[in-house]
Amino acid sequence: MKLRFNRKQLCIPYAAFLILFVIVPLLVIIYYAFTDGEGQFTFGNLISFFSSTNTIGTLIYSLALAITTTLVCLVIAYPTAYILARSHFKKKYVLLLLFIMPMWINFTLRITALKEILTAIEGNIAAYPFLNSVIGMTYDFLPFMILPLYTSLLKLDNSLLEAAQDLGASKIKVFLRVTLPLSVPGIISGITMVLLPSMTNYVVLDMLYNSTYIMGSLIGSYFNSFDWNNGSMISLILLVIIFIVTLVTNRFSDKDDNGGREVIL
């Protein structure tokens, strides 16, 4: 006897997972964000966030760290992905594997090794908190920038590049007017995959002896002190920021996917 399942039945496990691990925790966060310690509804947690110089400073620092990390990753990843995708040498997949391999190694082991290297170079790594945080974040998230860029550049239509060259465009002009615009979806995907986690991954900062708080560490400090209300409000605000960034990047990506980009030589 063959078992047959319709689409609705196959969706049940996904729906159950979504309800238990996404919707219910989100509702709990919303409840604590808009209540006080006695369970009374209040906007006090929201007002407290925007009136505190500590939380606003942490938000600005987190954004600065995330944007800097994203830009550094993009500057390193784009030429790397371009060489890997557009070159014709046989060993390029080995090089791609070398960039991906750190993702398979234990996170603690990788950051500990990086800490030892930075200590040998700088002596006291606590003296350069922002710089070392950017280095640690870049080391951690660089593969997430390389992979979407590599995929995007690999799928480029060579006939467009050849047509541009036949029309007399130089290699630099072909890159700026054809290759770069057509690789924007990969750039947007990479930015999304690096920018958002960089705002919350405080473990890297802790392991590199950076005592400066970012949004993730601030949320953790509130929950560790059993202040679920303020911690939930900050989590909710961070969730809104992430949603806005994702919405903006998706709109740019949809424009590129649906209408393409006009190539002007």
Image (cartoon, rainbow, N blue to C red):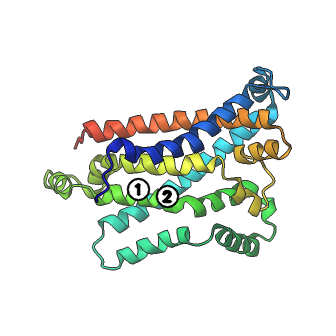
Q: Residue at x 67, y 30 (%)?
A: 30
Task: Please state which amino acid type lies under the numbered disc 1.
Answer: Pro
Q: Are marks 1 and 2 in contact (CB under 8 Å)?
A: yes
Looking at the image, which is closer to me, 177 or 26? 26
Q: Position of residue 164 (x, y in %)?
A: 18, 51
Task: Please state which amino acid type lies under the numbered disc 2.
Answer: Phe
Numbered mark located on residue 174 in the image = none
Horizontal side of 157 relative to 201 (left or right) equals: left
Q: Position of residue 209 (x, y in %)?
A: 79, 61
Instruction: State how many labels appear.
Output: 2
Tell me the residue that label 1 is attached to.
Answer: 148
Secondary structure category for the residue under label 1: helix
**Is residue 261 among what the camera can see?**
no
User: Measured along the vertical axis of the image, is residue 67 above or below residue 252?
Assistant: below
Q: Position of residue 93 (x, y in %)?
A: 37, 74
Tell me the residue that label 2 is attached to.
Answer: 144
Tell me the quarter of the picture where residue 97 sits: bottom left
Q: Residue at x 81, y 67 (%)?
A: 124
